[in-house]
Image: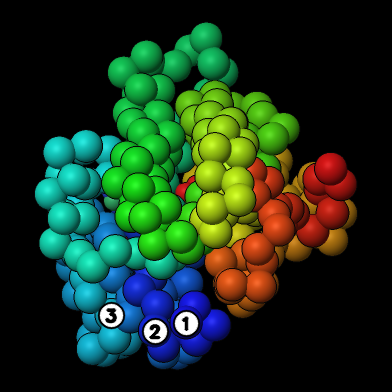
Amino acid sequence: MHQDWKTQHIVITGAASGLGRAICARFVILGASVRGIDIDKDQLEEVQAVLGKKFAPEICDVANWDQVVQVFSRFPPADVLVNCAGITGRTNIKSHETDPAEVERVFRVNFFGSYHTSKVVLPQMLSHGYGRLLHIASIAGKEGNAGMIAYSASKAAVIGMTKVQGKEVAGTGVTVNALAPAVIETPMVHALPDQQVKYMTDKIPMGRCGSLDELVAMVEFIVSPGCSFTTGFTFDLTGGRATY
Ligand SMILES: NC(=O)c1ccc[n+]([C@@H]2O[C@H](COP(=O)([O-])OP(=O)(O)OC[C@H]3O[C@@H](n4cnc5c(N)ncnc54)[C@H](O)[C@@H]3O)[C@@H](O)[C@H]2O)c1
């Protein structure tokens, strides 16, 4: 039953922009029913105008547990959840100079957002004996980017969560994995200071950003039925920056 994308219900957070938007577009082309979650109503409507009826937009702040419970209660159970919603917070700033409230804000979206949605979706997947959950982490979570304490530490927390959840559901038909890209050109990257982007791209042996097509191809594989023996793992997408 899960061999065919056309029978699958796929939920993507952060669907209004960048990675999330590109992933939604791929699964709509593959014939799946796609539900795209975001806080940006205008951009979500724009995505729907392009993607059409197979794409259902949902406004939800994933950092807010009550909203996540309420919005997800309106959906059919998800076969696939990809957590893309994320923010960098203020960057190019030393950790001892940051504002604790700002660091907490980034954690609330990047870590708690993915924790909230997975907490709702995992029981549904477990009761169906099938599911693919993918958290978009970052190389920053594996290596730590100087000037990005909130972002790096929250993504490290996502990687830790992936290891825990992946083991907890092993053998059930459900897998939980993460993907750690280096720099993929999106509005999030365009919004960073040039100095911060240079710091990140200078570390990539291939000497370039990754493309959205490269990202989407990996996501499609990781959440496919065929990717069934890998769980709790953080896949690499860094042009050679991370070889572990
Ligand atoms: N672009 C990169 O180079 C890169 C690299 C590594 C990891 N990532 C990760 O990939 C994910 C997507 O990044 P992107 O570059 O596409 O960013 P983006 O800014 O283009 O898109 C992020 C989307 O998340 C949404 N969002 C933010 N807070 C939200 C909330 N509380 N609830 C619901 N939606 C919310 C935004 O409105 C936006 O549409 C992020 O988690 C990011 O950390 C990106």
Callout 3 environment at 10 Å: few (<14), some (14 to 19), or many (20+)? many
Q: Nearer the viewer, mark 2 or mark 1?
A: 1
| First reached walking from the N terminus: tag 2 or tag 1 | 1
Mark 2 and 1 residues: CB-CB less than 8 Å, in contact? yes
Spatial CA span between label 1 and label 3: 21 Å
Give the residue displayed 30% in from the left and 46% down from the top: 120
Q: Is residue 140 above or below residue 228?
A: above
Asked if one can make out residue 149 in the rendered structure from this viewpoint, the answer is: yes
Q: Is residue 62 above or below residue 163?
A: below
| First reached walking from the N terminus: tag 1 or tag 3 | 1
Q: Quadrant of residue 140?
A: top right
Asked if one can make out residue 148 in the rendered structure from this viewpoint, the answer is: no
- The amino acid pointed to by label 1 is Met
Q: Position of residue 86 (x, y in %)?
A: 41, 46
| Residue under label 2 | 7
| Residue under label 3 | 55
- The amino acid pointed to by label 2 is Thr
| First reached walking from the N terminus: tag 2 or tag 3 | 2
Q: Is residue 145 above or below residue 73?
A: above
Give the residue displayed 67% in from the left and 29% down from the top: 144
Q: Quadrant of residue 12?
A: bottom left
| Residue under label 1 | 1
Give the residue displayed 23% in from the left and 68% down from the top: 76
Does dot 3 land on a helix, a strand or a loop? strand
Residue 206 as seen in the image, left or right of residue 224: right
Q: Position of residue 237 (x, y in %)?
A: 71, 57
Callout 2 environment at 10 Å: few (<14), some (14 to 19), or many (20+)? few
Does dot 2 land on a helix, a strand or a loop? helix
Spatial CA span between label 2 and label 1: 7 Å
Q: How is the image coloured?
A: rainbow
